[in-house]
Amino acid sequence: MVRLAIVADTPQGDSLAALVPRIAGAEVVLREATLEQLVAGGMADVDAVVLLSKESPDVCQQVVDAGKHLLVSLNSQFSTEAIQALSDQCQQQKVCLMVAGSDRLRPALQATWPSLAAGELGEPGLVRLHRWSSTGANGAGLPGDLLRDLDLVLNVFKSLPSEVYAITRSVAGAEEPDYIQIHLGFDGGGMAVIDRAATLPPGDGYFSFSVIGSAGAVYADDHLNKQLIFRGQHPVAVGTESGDLAAVADLQEFCQAIEQQRVARMSGADWLAAVKTAEMIRESIGACSAVRSGEGGAS
């Protein structure tokens, strides 16, 4: 049984704690608003800590120093040096580090990974990812959730890109780009195109993900059972959401990785690869040209 401490100063902590009874081999033994409260109360009865807020590297290191496994929210505030240091520390302490909030475990994508691993798609050649949202929904530039998209692509090719080219578009006077297109080239000829826009009419967003290989292809989107409603203005797509299934899958994977003493999906190394790729994207946008591995900060 994995004894969990959930640290969050928002109602999200209570929501996550309510999901734990659905996780095989896990129980919540502590629910705290801050890490300071957790440390003050002692962690002797805790095996693993779930940090839901965007914590600093120092806070994460306190958990690992105490020999506790760590599930931390995916965010773009950590530098590559900080992620590498945290990953190294987890290896030294022999504890599991997993990053929550990736899209790998979302229900719509679950058929993709076994197909790739079994070789049913052959060698991956092209990945296309679209993520479109309503106007004003955090822009389309380089928000933290871009790391989710990059992780999906990198999980297909199992390597950093050798070349990156990114372009953006901004409405006059806007602080954030409302459109970004990213081209990633990989050794061996594989490539990926990530297309993000924040210009849809108000209503549901749209996500799609496809992989084309030498022997097959897979496609997934978030519009299962969508119904299009039109009442004389903008059409609205209404459908059934996946709800909390992705969060349940994150917790289950974390606990299983601890019990099986293996590397979790998504690991510190995966987080590091996504951040390095994001750095290459920023370089490409700033230079208005393609960036190749070794030319900039990522390699």
Image (cartoon, rainbow, N blue to C red):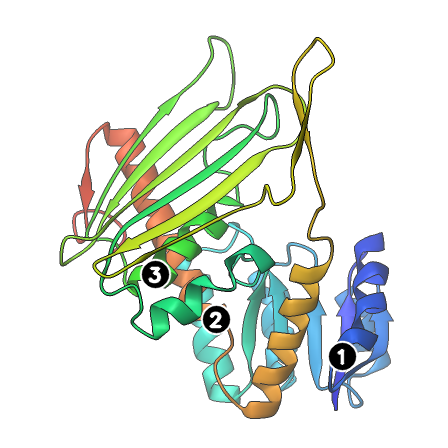
Residue 184 sits in quarter = top left
Few, some or many residues within 10 Å of mark 3 (<14, 14–19, 20+): some
Pick the residue in front: 173 or 196.
Answer: 196
In the image, taking residue 20 as reference, residue 238 lies left or right, namely left
- Residue 191 x, y percent position in the rendering: 23, 48
Q: Residue at x 40, y 62 (%)?
A: 272
**Helix or strand or loop: what does disc 1 sit on?**
strand
Residue assigned mark 1: 4
Q: Quadrant of the N terminus?
A: bottom right
Residue assigned mark 2: 267
Residue 284 sits in quarter = top left
**Helix or strand or loop: what does disc 3 sit on?**
helix
**Placement of 196 over or under 155, stated as above or below:** above
Three-letter code, disc 1: Leu
| Mark pair 3, 1: CA separation | 31 Å
**Helix or strand or loop: what does disc 2 sit on?**
loop
- Residue 243 x, y percent position in the rendering: 73, 53
Q: Is residue 101 visible?
A: no
Q: Nearer the viewer, mark 3 or mark 1?
A: 3
Q: Earlier in the sequence, mark 2 or mark 1?
A: 1
- Residue 116 x, y percent position in the rendering: 35, 67
| Mark pair 2, 3: CA separation | 15 Å
Q: Are marks 2 and 3 in contact (CB under 8 Å)?
A: no
Q: Residue at x 55, y 71 (%)?
A: 98
Image disc number at residue 156? 3
**Placement of 72 over or under 182, stated as above or below:** below
In the image, taking residue 227 as reference, residue 6 lies left or right, namely right
Three-letter code, disc 2: Ser
Q: Are marks 2 and 1 in contact (CB under 8 Å)?
A: no
Pick the residue in front: 22 or 229.
Answer: 229
Pick the residue in front: 228 or 181.
Answer: 228
Three-letter code, disc 3: Val
